[in-house]
Image (cartoon, helix red, strand yellow):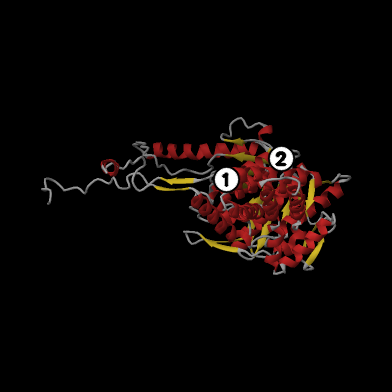
Amino acid sequence: MNQSIVLLQQPQILVLREGTDQSQGKPQLISNINACQIVVDAVRTTLGPRGMDKLIVDHNGKAVISNDGATIMKLLDIVHPAAKTLVDIAKSQDAEVGDGTTSVVIIAGELLKRLKPFIEEGVHPRIIVRAVRNAGRLAVEKVKELSVKVESKSPEEQRELLRKCASTAMSSKLIHQQKDHFSKMVVDAVLSLDAPLLPLDMIGIKKVTGGGLEDSFLVAGVAFKKTFSYAGFEMQPKSYDNCKIALLNIELELKAERDNAEVRVDNVKEYQKVVDAEWQILYDKLALLHASGANVVLSKLPIGDVATQYFADRDMFCAGRVTEEDLRRTQRACGGAVLSSVRDMKPDALGHCAEFSERQVGGERYNIFTGCPAAKTCTLILRGGSEQFLEETERSLHDAIMIVRRTIKNDAVVAGGGAIDMELSKHLRDHSKTIAGKEQLLIAAVARAFESIPRQLCDNAGFDATNLLNKLRQKHHQGEVWFGVDILKEDIADNYLACVWEPAVVKINAITAACEAAAQILSIDETIKNVKGGGDMAPPPGRGMGRPRMG
């Protein structure tokens, strides 16, 4: 009796600050899996050629319409700590490969969904994690074994292969109707870059509202929008052949004195000298630029009306307030250097290009430099009805460009449209029958998870998924490895022959990232959310000067 009294009187031990949210054990793991399912459901319907788009409005009221998994995941304001892992894998897939961002999230979510019953039945998470890692390794090995190396016999055949990969990447996007037009543009754009690096920043993408998508075109050089200009600009020549380009970081206009500078003069002549000196400094700079032989002058800082007229009188073209990115690309394409002084201008400080022209594109004018000798660069000028449509077109082209770059570097391809996923599912199912113990059931569950991609493709297109998956299982069992969903005929077909190709690296990356994410989420058994600093520790309200304490 006395002992129980002693036990009751033991003080409660508080290690964490009061109000800390601490949840652990199996319910915590189930809750994390459920949170991930909700995120997966947000992007599930965007998969494939018949995928739907999402309209996301941010806190500023800006609407974004997109079908790109990574874009949607970035824009969703996810606060659940475990679900954020899925956002990370979508971002990593986007950065590494460019396409397959929706697939990677769906595979990770499906793995968790299939493994959830084992958690509920009390299988230790570590055993499940080991099985997921093994299954991931087996799947990656199978992709490498199945992938077809396309021997580039000639540039035409390589171009055709790249075009097919770009078309597959675009088939699920908003611009899939014009994929033939855009896939040619994308392949030409990437092949015009310097191998083997293929730097992405040498492809500029400019958007001009108005016109149709087919009016989009590729400039084999640098193009940027006409900058703000003063009177006298229209008198300047608008095209040159073999022109020299001066790139500056100098202001060519008279500055209003703002820095509290004080010049005391006691007569008008003195004042006139100050003014003349300012004008003279400007004219000296302009004379040096003219003497250097430059035909085109581009500056990051403003070029004033006096300078504009001066250049116009001497048949020179100028543009001020050129953005940093455009100036940098022009420098890398045409050579030369960005100068911060016009003194001692050497000939090699000027850039060169074969042709310069100014063209009207929709309601905008564009300065276009082609035939740039130094580096290979290009600019895609996109046309389209609305701004949101153009932004989605840009995102779709980014995915296709990334895919083409990857295919040039790793020329192994696999068939898309759920074909490779069904084959991996069959491979893992067959493997699971050769092993004993719990792992057999777990690997079979992972095998079922891979079927989520063809199933989702069918669901999104409104087909009977169960019927088509049964047909696919039968075909794959007969050894037809490349059979997948044919969206156009509402049936199954050999997607390798139908040229629905994607680089093997897309699949390998997706499987690795999805298995890592699933393993990470299954490894978490406790979440401790600390309260914000100073939560309950707020100081008592002030009493004012000398006011007595109440009560």
- Check disc 1: other Cα within 10 Å, few if <14, some if 14-19, many if 20+: some
Residue 250, horizontal then vertical, whole percent:
54, 39
Image quarter of the N terminus: top left
Q: Nearer the viewer, residue 525 or 495?
A: 525
Q: Secondary structure at mark 2?
A: strand
Q: Is residue 525 left or right of residue 357?
A: left
Number of numbered tags placed on the structure image:
2
Mark 2 / mark 1, whichever is N-terminal: 1
Q: Is residue 495 left or right of residue 443?
A: right
Q: Which mark is residue 124?
A: 1
Give the residue at x 56% y 50%.
122
Q: Residue furthest top?
A: 344
Mark 2 to mark 1: distance in Å? 67 Å
Residue 426, horizontal then vertical, whole percent:
76, 53
Residue type highlighted by circle 1: His
Residue type highlighted by circle 2: His
Residue 13, horizontal then vertical, whole percent:
33, 40
Q: Nearer the viewer, residue 223 or 183?
A: 183
Q: Which circle, 2 or 1, is nearer the viewer?
A: 1
Residue 218, horizontal then vertical, whole percent:
73, 53
**Residue 316 seen in render:** no
**Residue 272 seen in render:** yes
Query: Dot 2 corresponds to which residue?
Result: 352
Give the residue at x 67% y 41%.
245
Q: Nearer the viewer, residue 366 or 539?
A: 539
Q: Which mark is residue 321?
A: none
Q: Quadrant of residue 394?
A: bottom right
Q: Are marks 2 and 1 in contact (CB under 8 Å)?
A: no
Q: Quadrant of residue 137?
A: top right
Q: Secondary structure at mark 1?
A: loop
Q: Is residue 384 left or right of residue 185?
A: left
- Check disc 2: other Cα within 10 Å, few if <14, some if 14-19, many if 20+: many
